[in-house]
Amino acid sequence: MEKVRVGIIGLGFMGTTHFGIHQANPKAQVVAVADIDKVKLTGNISAVVGNIGTRDSDQLDFSGIKTYENALDLINSPDVDMVDICVPTFLHKKFALAAIKAGKHVFLEKPFSRNLDEVKEIAAAARASDKNFNVGMCVRAWPEYFDARTRFKAGEFGALKSANFRRLSPSVDGNSWENWFMNNQRSGSAILDLHMHDIDLVRFFFGKPRAVNAFGLRGFRSDDGIDHVLARYDFGDGTLVSAEGGWAGTKSVPFEMSFQLICEKATVRFMSEGYKIYWENGEVESPEVGDATLPTGWHQELAYFVNCILDGSKPEKYQKLDELVDSFKMYEAELAAIESGKTVTINY
Ligand SMILES: NC(=O)c1ccc[n+]([C@@H]2O[C@H](COP(=O)([O-])OP(=O)(O)OC[C@H]3O[C@@H](n4cnc5c(N)ncnc54)[C@H](O)[C@@H]3O)[C@@H](O)[C@H]2O)c1
């Protein structure tokens, strides 16, 4: 196989972002797209709105690409090697299970699914498949985050004292198909859609916290979901690990994603000043990370997934399935902590 033949389901913000990334990758070729919206199937994406980045045109070129109104037809097409699922979260389970069953390599956008039971069902199917499966936890692959995590794990910064991850979005009310983000049943609201990245980073960087306590702002932007959250993860070792995130801000606030690690030998920050390491001896390092052709975690994770299909390897550089299930258990414990006002032990 010289190129991976990709089929994308869902041509909203994420599906069209993935389309551009695959089309720029010489090792991938988008051969099929599916969406229930006939206008988007003509390549007209003027209705699509997103939170990071800008696009050059409202018109995508789908010449030579098969278009499907029914995504199951794309999944069952023998011309498709890899199914890239970019539909709203409440539809993840349906299409992920169908694509795994059809024997395809599956890249499933984050969050994994709407609840832990669904996650366990998809994970079991993925484990039983001989094809590759990844969830688009793109921040794990974001160059600054991946570099900091790799160097932290290698012991360069010394023992952790405190960590904080932030993800602050403007309101996304009105940005999505049928405004599904604002429907908690469909999206899980900001705690699942946005803050989940930072829950998962806590797992990725530091392992499994034993308990969580958290506070949430409910029903301010969405119908009745958690639109902003503050959480503290207890590792039982005196470290102070926390995360904050949400989409409660007005439409005009800029998107922010940032972190700070305070360790014995250095303070590591990815904030308004860029990605910097402030060493205890006074030196300040500005690491050069990433690569101009793969500037974001989306580029990195998709290029890597395609490469793994071509070389027949398991895609475990950025994620292991069990870790993603752990993150979902952390998320459900966090919801329970918000509901009860108590610290909740996480059962892995
Ligand atoms: N990794 C990230 O940084 C990131 C960012 C944004 C969204 N996402 C995730 O990507 C997924 C999609 O989000 P989005 O922002 O692109 O949403 P969106 O509302 O912009 O797009 C959803 C698309 O799915 C289509 N669709 C709906 N039902 C369908 C069906 N049954 N079959 C085929 N197509 C269908 C809609 O017509 C629409 O084009 C979500 O799971 C979201 O959480 C990830």
Image (cartoon, helix red, strand yellow):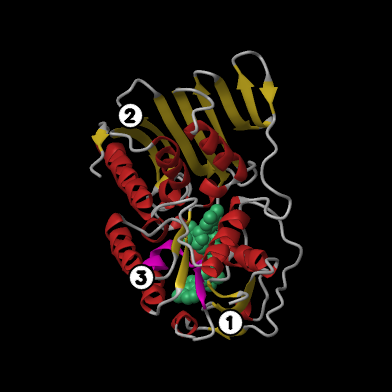
> Are the two marked residues, 2 and 3, in contact with CB atoms closer than 8 angstroms?
no
The residue tagged 3 is: 129
- Residue 177 shows up from this direction: no
The residue tagged 2 is: 235
Q: Residue drawn at (58%, 80%), measured in percent from left and top?
A: 32
Dot 1 or dot 2, earlier in sequence: 1
Disc 1 packing (10 Å; few <14; some 14–19; many ≥20): few
- Residue 281 shows up from this direction: yes
Q: Residue drawn at (53%, 77%), measured in percent from left and top?
A: 35
- Helix, strand or loop status at disc 3: loop
Which residue is most to the top? 281
Left or right side of 119 for 152: right
> Are the two marked residues, 1 and 2, in contact with CB atoms closer than 8 angstroms?
no
The residue tagged 1 is: 38
Q: Which region of the structure is painted magenta?
A: 81-93
- Helix, strand or loop status at disc 2: loop
- Find out if the beta carbon at label 3 lies less than 8 Å from the nearest ligand 1 atom: no
Q: Rounded to the nearest whole Å, what is the CA distance between mark 1 and mark 3?
A: 32 Å
Using the image as rendered, state which of residue 242 and residue 105 is in the foreground: 105
Kind of residue at badge 1: Lys
Kind of residue at badge 3: Ser
Using the image as rendered, state which of residue 295 and residue 48 is in the foreground: 295
Quadrant placement of the C terminus: top left
Q: Judge depth for marks 1 and 2 and give the one in front.
A: 2
**x, y percent for residue 6:** 57, 74
Q: Residue drawn at (42%, 38%), measured in percent from left and top?
A: 202
